[in-house]
Amino acid sequence: MRVPATGVGRTSPVPRDLAPLEATMQEEIRLADSNGVLTPVARGWLRSALAAPSIHNTQPWRFRVGDRHIDIFADRSRRLHVVDPRGRELLISVGAALLNLRVAMLANGRTPMLRLVPGGAEPDLVAQVIPGPPTSISETARLLAEAIPRRHTNRRPFDPTAVPPEVLADLCGAAAVEGAHLEVVDPAVRDAVLGVVRTAEHRRRRDPEYLRELAEWTVDVGDRRDGIPPEAFGPWSALEVVPLRDFGLIQPVPRRAAVEFEAEPTIALLYTTGDNPEQWLRAGQALERTLLTATVRGLASTLMTQPLELPQMRELFTVSAENQVAQVILRFGYGPPSAPSPRRPLESFLLGTDAPVRRHDR
């Protein structure tokens, strides 16, 4: 089924003065009662946001819910200090959660009014979303919303079947709606990209600080609800044709097989114009819309960000003349079902109406 490129991404901007908008909005919807208890609609929207992908499944977001708005915060206590010292991938993750929140609102017949506010008076507040005027539920919004709980990172071998050009065009269109550019690379460039990813992965394996950080997010302890669980590690690529991040380096999994991956993977790079916190948030929204579109079209997907975490290697992917900066490397294909990663309970992400972001103890 084709996913139209229009219908979800054209989110209305929020005026700087929100009072007139809220005072005149037709059929206002409340997100919390006078005691601060969330309505079922608000809980459903937030659960959709929580289903977004995040680096190492850190889930680095918090929410403050008012009567008629939702504030989205970055939880910087969950930043990966080795892999992500600038917090770039953290904000990409938050952007993905923001896209899911917007889609959930649209699928519930509300126009999300979005304002990105990174670097404002509250340093960790990055966006505010208001459920705006009623709107008809488009087929695109419905399909993407239904894909949210089905989208999972897949680290397994994919079928050798080529992804049709029209499906790749859908993915590129999804990224474009969110102001990003998705470049599906040809075989020669693909092999070069995979070579750089492979080099970055090998370099990381020799870094003791990286290994310590990896261990922190792959330890399988009781009822832990974040990090990468062993069932999501995936098998080992015997010939490293597809050099995925090896989450089993520190926590070996019994019977983790070495298998043959597809010889000609479909690889794409997601670019933004510029490289600042607002662009990282936009990259996250473009990434998640692309991943949801892939899910609708029956594709599996994997992120391969290792070289983008090393500044000198990341420069290899920058198109300086056009100010195009690589934010994500992706692999697409037709693969078997993959296990979902766990999520913490909704209550652990909620802030009080006037509360600052607190460090969350894992």
Image: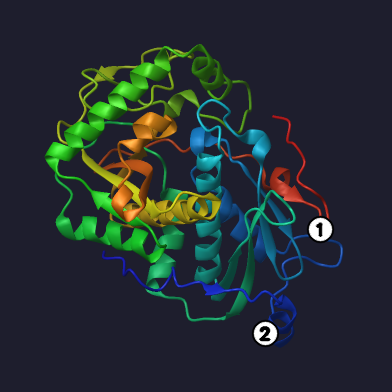
Q: Residues within 10 Å of mark 2 (few under 14, many from 20)?
A: few
Q: Is residue 45 above or below residue 96?
A: below
Residue type, numbered disc 2: Met
Spot occupied by residue 218 in the image (x, y as percentages of width and height): 53, 22
Residue positioned 40% across, 62% down in the render: 179
Disc 2 element: loop
Count of numbered circles on the image: 2
Q: How is the image coloured?
A: rainbow
| Residue 353 numbered tag | 1
Quarter occupied by the N terminus: bottom left
Distance, label 1 to label 2, CA atoms, is: 22 Å
Spot occupied by residue 40 in the image (x, y as percentages of width and height): 68, 63
Q: Quick one: 255 or 100, which is closer to the camera?
A: 100
| Residue 25 numbered tag | 2
| Residue 88 numbered tag | none
Residue type, numbered disc 1: Thr
In-image side of 200 versus 357 (left or right) = left
Which of the marked residues, 1 or 2, is nearer the chain's N terminus? 2
Q: Is residue 219 visible?
A: no
Disc 1 element: loop
In-image side of 330 versus 21 (left or right) = left
Spot occupied by residue 344 in the image (x, y as percentages of width and height): 64, 39
Residue positioned 36% across, 26% down in the render: 234
Q: Is residue 348 above or below residue 170?
A: above
